[in-house]
Amino acid sequence: MRKKISILVSLMVILSLIQPAGIQKAFSASLLDRIVAAVNEEVITWSELMNTIIIDGRQMLSGMTGTERQEKIRELERPVLNGLIEMKLQLQVAHRMDLDVSESEIDGAINDIRKKYGLTEEDLMNSLKNEGLNREDYRKRLGDQILLQKVINFAVRNNVVVSDKEAEQHYNENMDKYDVEEKLRIRQIFFVLPGVSTEKKALEARAREIVNRIRGGEDFAQLAREYSEDPSSEFGGDLGFIRRGSALKEVEDAAAELHIGEVSNPFWSSAGLHIIKLEDKVEGGDLDKIKSEIKEALFQRTFEEKYREWKAELREKSYIEIKL
């Protein structure tokens, strides 16, 4: 027993000579658990890494046993460790900024999760148990996530600004990617304008009969294949999406009056007699609406770039030693 104590003391003396002073205390608390990384004044232990892999990689490891499972765990060790290092670096910044998370904030987050997924308290506890977590572990992990969001907002997100000028420039350079006009998808049954005016009455009666059959439950597309004199008949009368100015005015005007799924009465154009059905409608966006969407997309892209830069800067300025 004396010999074992002597060896333990020797290890601690050696550690005090080779480790930065800030992690001596953390090491003594983790002495019986192998350290896989030092992150400034904190350490990451083997058990912490393995717990994270088992919990966060549960789906990837599902169904694996023996050698296959061990190989997958080894494959996950390095990326998961890098994620833990990044998290600790960011949480350290949060603590230096005196940011914290209250118990009521954690309670609120848990309640939001329960409401979102329709979980009772018992459901939540069973779910945690299946994931290998107890209530205290879950609250700790949730608190860390809330604190991470706070520090990211303060250090990065709040410093990202996208101006109207930037959004307008992006729009002007990418106009073909944005729809600012309404689009209507229609089907039609079409009859060519007869050469003799007296035939129009008979054609109108025929068209009204077809409309009645459609409203009685028969399939528009099938009737278009049978009766329509337009090339679209082989596609069930489907004309695809049309914009204002791309089709006959009479067709556009009639389509604009319909609700999705509704069929028009027969109507004439300069080309002939039409029956149309509105299949779908894509609302057009005015430029102000498009501008807001562009600003949001540009903001997200800029934020992601700044976030990556911030994380890289934290690593460069920190003491990190990986012992995996």
Image (spheres, helix red, strand yellow):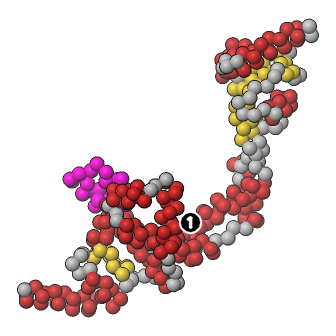
Q: Which quarter of the image is occupied by the N terminus?
A: bottom left
Q: Position of residue 124 (x, y in %)?
A: 41, 58
Residue 19 colored in magenta in the image:
no
Image position of 237 with respect to 242: above or below: above
Q: Amino acid at mark 1?
A: Glu
Which quadrant would residue 120 be assigned to in this image?
Answer: bottom left
Residue at 69 percent across and 58 percent down: it is 294
Q: Position of residue 315 (x, y in %)?
A: 44, 77
Secondary structure under tag 1 reads: helix
Which quadrant would residue 12 be assigned to in this image?
Answer: bottom left
The answer to whether one can see residue 82 in this image is no
Callout count: 1
The answer to whether one can see residue 179 in this image is yes
Answer left or right for 197 relative to 130: right
Answer left or right for 34 relative to 216: left
Graded by Cα atoms within 10 Å as few (under 14), some (14 to 19) or many (20 or more), the crowding at tag 1 reads some
Image position of 79 with respect to 190: above or below: below
Residue at 62 percent across and 74 percent down: it is 158
Residue at 71 percent across and 53 percent down: it is 174
Q: Which residues are magenta?
A: 55-75
The residue wearing badge 1 is 304
Residue 60 colored in magenta in the image:
yes
